[in-house]
Amino acid sequence: MAKVSVCIPTYNRSHYLTYAVNSVLNQTYSDFELIICDDGSPDNTPEVVAKFQDSRIRYIRHEQNMGRSRNMRSGFEASQGDYFIKFDDDDALTPGFLEKTVNILDENSQVDFVCTNHWIIDKDSKRSESATKENAIRWGKDRLKKGIIEDLDWQTFYHQSLQVGSTLFRYSCLKDVDYMDPKADGCEDFDLLVRLALIEKVGYFLPEYLMEYRFHGGQTSLGQNLHFLEAKVYCIENYKFSDQELEEQRKIKLAATQQDLGLRFIEKGKTAEGRKLLKASKHILGDSKRTNLGLLLSYLPINLRQLILKQFRQWKPKDYTEKVRTQTN
């Protein structure tokens, strides 16, 4: 039985999957199993997986699409290792990831999971130094020190500084929170880390760049944003923090997410739902230009709403994620 279970959930990304799989097979640590769980991909994923002749690979193919969270759970439930990591089919591990994170868990029995820093790569697997630096600053990774994370609830919920794909977990701690919640589908990584913090699990930060996170075109759309925001509202509504300052921040974050979702609903034509969410957010955030704009747009024809909101997005300066997604080499 392998000590580490590595899970790559995949759907219709055979063009990136080879890079992800090779990053596992090229690890300096070899006591692992690799579980590829395929959510009914209509592309040539089965043929791509079949080309790998390695007994450590286990391929689980679902004939029908069952959704991200359920697909991830299938890999988790099939795993046999004491330690577990899941990362996406368009990302990768650097060669020393497993060796370095396994050593920390082996030497620190009180630690439940180890999170590392990560590179930002583009569609051609080229690392972006500038985007990597901006990402570390944006999520506060540049402020985290090596060792046990003392304020795990703040780091997971408020700062969102940790990432599941760059984290090695003890399998037992994931069992304690029932791993991925299907109701949080689209927001399941964020939710998993927050729930671990809520039951006082111990996280450790290793400030080395041991994983590669890919930005590429096609990762976002109105539909995906709606799905993500609905899941995020569900998650935040169900948390409760004993730290009163953080609990107040939870209410603010919930209102801000309701505002974002309300605007998306209005853009999509779900007018009544959008107005309800915007009015709910107003109770916490007070009067704001975004809320008032959304309520005003809700009385316009849908094609005009979409045109105005599209124009506003074009005026907004591109952040580092958009720059990496659109750049060509």
Image (cartoon, rainbow, N blue to C red):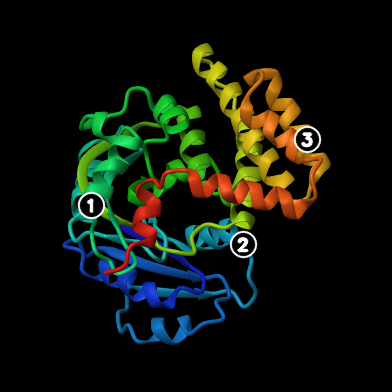
Residue 65: image quadrant is bottom right
In space, the residues marked 3 and 2 are separated at their CA atoms by: 29 Å
Q: According to the image, label 2 marks what residue?
A: 67
Q: Nearer the viewer, residue 64 or 34?
A: 64
**Image: 133 above or below 38:** above
Q: Position of residue 64 (x, y in %)?
A: 65, 74
Give the class, few, some or many, for how many residues have Cα within 10 Å of label 1's Cα (few <14, many ≥20).
many
Q: According to the image, label 3 marks what residue?
A: 275
| CB under 8 Å between discs 1 and 2 | no
Residue 6: image quadrant is bottom left
**The C terminus - image quarter:** bottom left
Q: Amino acid at mark 3?
A: Arg
- Mark nearer the N terminus (3 vs 1): 1
Q: Position of residue 76 (x, y in %)?
A: 48, 58
Q: Is residue 1 left or right of residue 104?
A: right
Tell me what residue is drawn at x 41 percent, y 74 percent. Answer: 58
- Mark nearer the N terminus (3 vs 2): 2
- Mark nearer the N terminus (1 vs 2): 2
Question: Taking the image as drawn, is residue 18 in sight?
Answer: yes
In space, the residues marked 3 and 1 are separated at their CA atoms by: 44 Å
